[in-house]
Image (cartoon, rainbow, N blue to C red):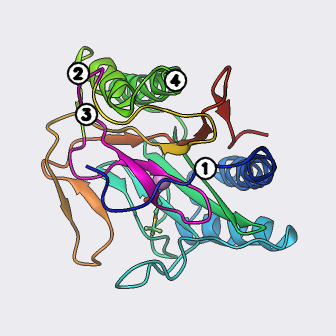
Amino acid sequence: MNSGRQIHIKSPAELKIMREAGRINAEVLATVKNLIQPGVSTADLNAAAEEVLKKHGCYSPFKGYSQPPYPASICTSINEELVHGIPSRKRILREGDIISVDSGTVYQGFVADSAFTVGVGEISPEAKNLLEITQGALAAAIDKMRVGNRTGDVSAAIQNYVESRGLHVTREYTSHGVGREMHEGPMVPNFGSAGTGLPLKPGMTIAIEPMVLIGTHATRVLRDQWTVVSADKSLTAHFEHSVAVTEGEPLILTVP
Ligand code: MF3
Ligand code: CO
């Protein structure tokens, strides 16, 4: 369950750099969040993100990633789009939509990775509940990022939080180690059993990203080969923070 990727323990000096990367990434997300309103295109959001990155001499690890190369600096995923939605001039936000914005920043060779989901104007009670539960799952998972716990404790926290509230977690996409690479070990699924998996160690850094669906956990990928949607088109949400394990409290890297 490690996807073959290596786990890299970060030194205190490296964590300092990752914290700075996370601060810049938080500025990107805050800037984008401020622009979200009916009538704005997702390409506008991408352009604003790139401006902030450029100001700091940074760039996004998303752009050019994988095959076919991801074509933008952020992901913008609306309503039934769970993750990896591609910004477009043609995609205009409408009142009542919910949009996930996922942003990555490379600063001094280290990656920060974080996402939020927010409503556009007034949203339905069902959508509000989905956002609250997904954000709650992220908080519950972060609280497990302590020495003495294992990766399965983080996975189980997400699954239990979400499923006990009647919603569903993705099976195909996972939380992941983050550092010099956007995706390092350990791979941490959104589901699993407490007490299993790898022991958490100080200096481990993991991008924790609960991806939650209202209908079922089934997903499919659109013909653009990136956008992941719920198979039943039900609403979905996604929150993410890059978090370090320390000797004490979990250290959230991707906050101001
Ligand atoms: N937070 C996402 C992830 O960890 C962002 C990747 S978007 C991609 O996988 F386009 F770069 F793949
Ligand atoms: Co991620």
Q: How many marks?
A: 4
According to the picture, the residue beneath numbered tag 4 turns out to be: 139
Ranked by sequence position, the earlier of labels 3 and 1 is: 1
| Secondary structure found at label 3 | loop
Q: Foreground mark, 4 or 3?
A: 3
Name the residue type under label 1: Gln
Ranked by sequence position, the earlier of labels 4 and 3 is: 4
Q: Which residues are magenta?
A: 170-195
Label 4 near ligand 2 (CB < 8 Å): no
- Alpha carbon of mark 3 to alpha carbon of mark 1: how far? 33 Å
Ranked by sequence position, the earlier of labels 1 and 2 is: 1
Ranked by sequence position, the earlier of labels 2 and 4 is: 4
Ranked by sequence position, the earlier of labels 3 and 2 is: 2
**Residue 245 at what x, y percent from top left?**
60, 33
Of residues 157 and 51, the one nearer the viewer is 157
Name the residue type under label 4: Ala
Instruction: Answer above or below: position of 103 versus 207.
Output: below
Q: Foreground mark, 3 or 1?
A: 3
Which numbered disc covers residue 163? 2
Badge 2: how crowded within 10 Å, few (<14), some, or many (20+)? some
- Alpha carbon of mark 4 to alpha carbon of mark 1: how far? 26 Å
Tell me whether circle 3 and circle 2 mark residues in contact (CB < 8 Å): no
Q: Residue at x 53, y 71 (%)?
A: 62
Name the residue type under label 3: Phe
According to the picture, the residue beneath numbered tag 3 turns out to be: 191
Q: Residue furthest top?
A: 164
| Secondary structure found at label 1 | loop
Left or right: residue 34 versus residue 119 is right
Ranked by sequence position, the earlier of labels 4 and 1 is: 1
Name the residue type under label 2: Glu
Label 2 near ligand 2 (CB < 8 Å): no
Left or right: residue 171 versus residue 226 is left
